[in-house]
Image: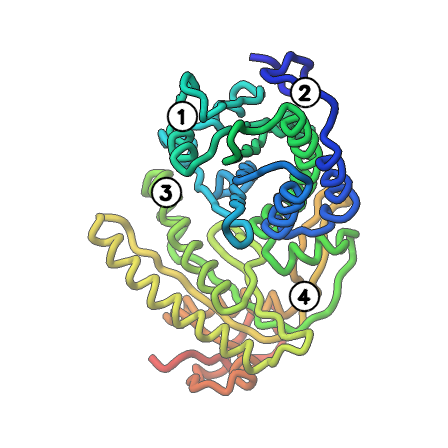
Amino acid sequence: MPKPGSKRKEKFATPPGHPGAAEVVRWMLYEGRFNPRMREFGDEMCRRIVTAGIPLYRGFCAVETLHPQLYGAAYVWQRDQQGAMRRSAGRGLREKPVFANSPINEIRKTSRPLRRRLEQPDCPIDFPALAEIKQEGCTDYVAMPMICSNRMINAITWATDRPGGFSDAEVAGLTDIAAALSVIVELQSAHRIARSLLNTYVGRRTGDRVLAGSIARGSVEAISAVIWFCDLRGFTTLADTIERDRLLALLNDYFEIMANTVASEGGEVLKFIGDAMLAIFECGSGADTAAQCAAALRAAHKVHGEIAERNRQRHAAGEPRINFGLALHLGEVSYGNIGAPDRLDFTVIGPAVNHATRLEKLASELGRPMVTSASFRAAAKAPLESLGFHKLRGVSDPQEVFAPPA
């Protein structure tokens, strides 16, 4: 198999470029590439190809991505339809026959272009997708690799329904367009991958801040926020008594419910600390403090319901229960980059964070699954009952603690 990017003889000739295609490439490089919405970009690109005199009926671009759940995305354009469509595929796609026996997979394996003159009687219909395209009335089909600088191979396919198919000059023009597109797709993919990775590992809002340039150590800002701190109870005992895979499954169940519920109410998970989770509901930038407290409280109630349901499922499967404690506190925190010069953490610090962690420990001592601080209760205006005043480690004065009615 030839190395991607190496010189090789193509399967079809590439005569001098198509003048109309050259205009499309010019538009792509000087104007189109600034549109980050690939469906809009792809729709205009394909319509410009038709206007340039190349009888394109259908375009299909497959792009691999770096995402914990998605294998890639495909953009599909068809002349008689409005706009382009985007389709996503999960990580399991590569094992499915529909992908294994496809021109896209063949392109990625060989890094060579592929052409099928569908109207010719002896044309091999060696992929199921070709039979579908031929049935739609297409007469010619060309698939091309789009080789990235890191040797990853994406692919684009072109089909026409004109009798006689594409001319050699038109194929050459489409080849030039694919080459320009590969650069644009790589740049756009790099931005999406960066955003996806940041969203996955540091959270959406924090990721946006990092991409916007908040990357210098010590660049922090004071914000008001609801601090959410939760911790598994009995985790040390569990870690000593059950198998690793079962322990990881329990952790994943717990964190999945916690993180998804916080996000669903507009909060942001900042980090997982062993079996604990730190999240915030930011009250700055015009956000209403009472509304953010109410959102955090709704998330807390949802968590209790979902954990109870998951525990019923775990009990039926003979798995240990998920027991946790949760504290909600409202205060001012320092939010930004903290750490070593070449290893930073975008998080929140300050006495308010310490207050929340101490509250969570107190919840266990009081036998309550959730407690809140007085500042949270005052802002939330929610029916929370007082559990009295308690001493928190590191806090000079006893603090009144609240909880939902038992």
Q: CA gap, disc 3 to disc 2? A: 66 Å
Q: Amino acid at mark 4?
A: Gly
- Give the residue pinned by disc 4: 350
| Residue ID at (45%, 42%) | 89
Q: Nearer the viewer, mark 1 or mark 4?
A: 1
Q: Amino acid at mark 3?
A: Asp
Placement of the C terminus among the 4 image quadrants: bottom left
- Give the residue pinned by disc 3: 240
Q: Nearer the viewer, mark 3 or mark 2?
A: 2
Side of 334 relative to 109 (left or right): right
Rendering quarter of residue 3: top right
- Give the residue pinned by disc 1: 127
The mark nearer the N terminus, 1 or 3, is 1
Q: Nearer the viewer, mark 2 or mark 4?
A: 2
Q: CA gap, disc 4 to disc 3? A: 33 Å
Please say if 44 is above or below 116.
below
| Residue ID at (60%, 13%) | 2
- Give the residue pinned by disc 2: 14
Q: Nearer the viewer, mark 4 or mark 3?
A: 4
